[in-house]
Amino acid sequence: MHIAILTFEGYNELDSLIALGVLNRIKADDWRVTIATPRAKVTSMNGVTIEQMSTLEEACAADAVIVGSGIATREVVEDEAIMSVLRGLDPSRQLIAAQCSGALVLAKLGLLNDIPACTDLTTKPWVIAAGVEVLNQPFYAKDNIATAGGCLASHYLAAWIIARLEGNDAAEGALHYVAPVGEKEEYIKRAWRNITPYLPAPTPALV
């Protein structure tokens, strides 16, 4: 199982790296989480340089993808070399999630047609201009596409992906690990309150 976090030049560390940490609470042998970048190294909005773990092409073949956010997303969506590769993203065969300005990438790829989105306040007018309704809430998902707004909503995307791929117990365990001490129960309840409405209904047990 490969989960790729698309991370571009000028990326937001909270968006890419919190998701990376939460997703890596799953310790299954076939579970792999990578930072997917357009080149060998990218530097964050605050000067943190990280190395490529997978390519954008590999991300398009992953089981799940998170499109990270950053200060250069408008440049990303104008980069035809990047966008031509990302047109390989396909919600019919993979989970696709976007964090903050990552929603603009999905909008420009035509993946948010008739689907509202969550994003950060800075990106909101750009996503609206792209023809997408923006919701005043931290998380929304429909079928295999999810979006989150606000850096500290990134754990919602990670938990949604874990719940979809490994089950609710695994997602709760990952959230419990990262939640603040003394607030774990409250933290998990809030997360489930935001995520549960957008998870598939449980399959009835056979009698």
Image (cartoon, grey):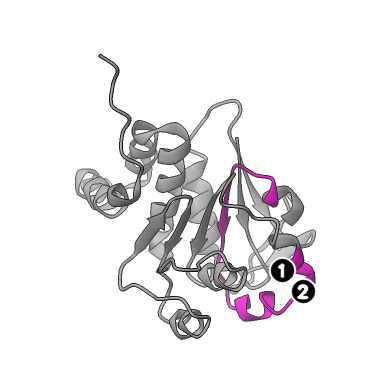
Q: Single out the residue that lies furthest toward the top.
A: 207
Q: Which mark is residue 83?
A: 1
The answer for how far apart the CA atoms under marks 2 and 1 are is 5 Å
Q: Residue at x 65, y 44 (%)?
A: 62
Mark 2 residue element: helix
Nearer the observer, 58 or 203: 203
Q: Label 2, on which residue?
A: 80
Vertical placement of residue 173 versus 37, above or below: above
Classify residue 160 as left or right of residue 60.
left
**Could you say where residue 189 lies in the image, as x and y percent from the top left?**
22, 47
Residue 78 among magenta residues? yes
Kindly indicate whether the residue at mark 1 contacts the one at mark 2 (C-beta within 8 angstroms): yes
Residue 134 among magenta residues? no
Q: Residue at x 43, y 66 (%)?
A: 115
Q: Which residues are magenta?
A: 60-84
**Could you say where residue 102 lies in the image, as x and y percent from the top left?**
54, 68
Nearer the observer, 14 or 196: 196
Vertical placement of residue 122 versus 199, above or below: below
Which image quarter is the N terminus in? top right
Identify residue type, mark 1.
Met
Identify residue type, mark 2.
Glu
